[in-house]
Every structure is written in structure tokens, then in C-alpha cells.
């Protein structure tokens, strides 16, 4: 399965992406986690120490990689024929929980439709990673809706849209869902996060019912997750005691069932 995790900034999408990646790894899958957020934090969630995470050079800033994979000697013409495995094996980072991490970074360009070498490489790399690699891919997307405009998640099997009960977050979730459908992503799911009471749970349920979007699950507000973040720890250290993590694991089981059904069809 190839899964994109999206949502408004601050809703907990990186937490969800990290726990799901860990879930699939524990199930015996080969897992590639991709941090496509311009402010990458997935490395910390996956257990890398802060100093080691800071030393990761994103693909978009790796001049040696970009030149070796795109240079032709002709201005505006880029060579994009390369082995994806080669890139992942050389620039992917092995995390303490057995998950391979690739940090994409962001491409800073004036105006849309940039054809700079870094942007061309990332587009080609993401496409081949998502289409060709036989493993579970969990991609932590950029917050908001801009990544959908760039088509970054176009070839994903499923889009998980994380929302909290706030009006702004739900509004962004509605926009993400609409754009995902326009792109042809057939399976989109809503995940409610930081749910404190039944009233907030009902708010999310009414939203998905009104817009006919499948609800994958509701994650309870978990003070312990915030405390691990304050201590600079990964919540994966406490997977057996955090109620919120247990809820996400159940979502992983549902995704596995859905994936198996899709294969049979």
C-alpha cells in the first residue's frame, strides 16, 4: 500500500504517519517513510536523535544527487532515467524502529510550474517510489492543500486526512478531500484526532456523514503524547501504554483489510 497522510498544520499528521509506519514494520512489511513536509519532523517521531535528524540532507538540497541524476549539459533539459532503489539505498536513513526514511525537502521557486532540476528530480522520484517499489510507503505530506496542486500524491492508493475538531481544520479537510477526488485518488479517509469528548466526536461524525467521506477512526486526546514531545522523545517508545497509539494501530488493521480486499478485486 502507498498511503499519504495530509491535513492542516498542527493536527497531528506526523504523529499518525509515524505510528502507522511503525505498525506496518511490526507486521513484517518493508516500510519506506517519506517526509515531504518543508519543515520535516518525521525523523524525530521515528526515533532518530535530534542531532542525527539535523544532519539529514533533504533530496531537494542534495546538489551532488541532483546533478548526477539530472545533468545533461543542455540548459533546461534534464535526464531523469535513474534507479529509485539506488537513491533510496544511498540517501535513505535507517531509523531505530527498522523504518527507512527519505526526507524530500521543499523546492523554493518563484511561481508555479518550476522546471528546475531539484523539482524535476523530486517529481520523478516520488512517482517511481509510489508506482514501482514493492513495499508499504507512508508519506507525511506538506500541511494544507498546496501539495495537491503540485500533484505530489497523485499515484497514492489512499489519502488519510487528519483533522481535529476545530472549524478551520475541518474546513481544510473538506478542501483536501475535494482536491484529492479531482486528482483521481479513489480512496480518501478522515481521521479525527485530539478528540476530548463525545461532543467533539459527534462533530467529526456529522462532517463525514454530510460529505460522504469514510471515517477511519477517532483518536482520543492524549496528554502523554504532548509530554513525550516536550521531552524530545518519540511516542513509539510507549506504544504499549499510549491509548492514542492503540487507536492508530486499529486503523492500520483496517487499512490492511482494505488493501487485501483491493488485491482480491
Image (spheres, rainbow, N blue to C red):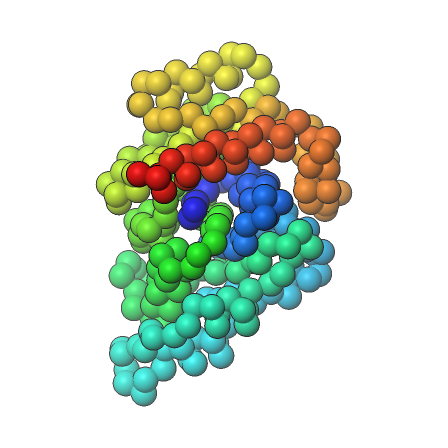
Question: Which residue is outermost to the top?
Answer: 199
Quadrant occupied by the C terminus: top left
Q: Residue at x 71, y 33 (%)?
A: 240
- How far across and how far down the image is residue 49, in percent? 71, 56
Residue 7 visible in the snapshot: no
Measured from the top left, where is residue 195 in percent x and y?
56, 22
**Residue farthest to the front, as pictured:** 264
Horizontal side, residue 98 vs residue 202: left or right: right
The quadrant in which residue 51 appears is bottom right
- Residue occupying the point 63% across, 33% down: 245
Q: Note whether 256 is above or below 168 in the view shown.
A: below
- In the rendered structure, the answer to whether residue 85 lies left or right of residue 197 reads left
Looking at the image, which is closer to me, 20 or 254?
254
The relative height of residue 159 versus residue 218 in the rendered view (above or below) is below
Q: Residue at x 60, y 63 (%)?
A: 93
Relative to 156, residue 254 above or below: above
In this rendering, is residue 248 above or below 46? Answer: above
Residue at 27% x, 77% y is 76
Tally of marks: 0
- Farthest residue toward the right? 231
Is residue 90 in sight in this rendering?
A: yes
Q: Position of residue 28 (x, y in %)?
A: 58, 48
The picture places residue 206, in percent across and down from the top left corner, at 39, 16
Amino acid at each position: 500500500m502507498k498511503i499519504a497522510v495530509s491535513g492542516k498544520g498542527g493536527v497531528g499528521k506526523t504523529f499518525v504517519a509515524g505510528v502507522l509506519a511503525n505498525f506496518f514494520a511490526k507486521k513484517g512489511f518493508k516500510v519506506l517513510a517519506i517526509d515531504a513536509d518543508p519543515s520535516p519532523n518525521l525523523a524525530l517521531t521515528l526515533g532518530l536523535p535530534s542531532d542525527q535528524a539535523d544532519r539529514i540532507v533533504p533530496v531537494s538540497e542534495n546538489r551532488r544527487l541532483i546533478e548526477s541524476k539530472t545533468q545533461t549539459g543542455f540548459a533546461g533539459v534534464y535526464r531523469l532515467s535513474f534507479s529509485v532503489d539506488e537513491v533510496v539505498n544511498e540517501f535513505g536513513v535507517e531509523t531505530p524502529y527498522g523504518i527507512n526514511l527519505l526526507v524530500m525537502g521543499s523546492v523554493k521557486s518563484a511561481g508555479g510550474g518550476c522546471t528546475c532540476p531539484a523539482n524535476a528530480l523530486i517529481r520523478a522520484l516520488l512517482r517511481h517510489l509510489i508506482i514501482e517499489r514493492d513495499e508499504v510507503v507512508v508519506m507525511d505530506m506538506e500541511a494544507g492543500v498546496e501539495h495537491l496542486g503540485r500533484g505530489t500524491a497523485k499515484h497514492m492508493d489512499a489519502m488519510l486526512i487528519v483533522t481535529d475538531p476545530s472549524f478551520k481544520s475541518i474546513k481544510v479537510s473538506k478542501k483536501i478531500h475535494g482536491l484529492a477526488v479531482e486528482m483521481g485518488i479513489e480512496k480518501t479517509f478522515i481521521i479525527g484526532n485530539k478528540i476530548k469528548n463525545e461532543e467533539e466526536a459527534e462533530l467529526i461524525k456529522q462532517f463525514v456523514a454530510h460529505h460522504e467521506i469514510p471515517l477511519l477512526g477517532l483518536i482520543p486526546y492524549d496528554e502523554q503524547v504532548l509530554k513525550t514531545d516536550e521531552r524530545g522523545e518519540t511516542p513509539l517508545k510507549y506504544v504499549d501504554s499510549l491509548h492514542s497509539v492503540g487507536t492508530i494501530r486499529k486503523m492500520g488493521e483496517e487499512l490492511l483489510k482494505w488493501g487485501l480486499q483491493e488485491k482480491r478485486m
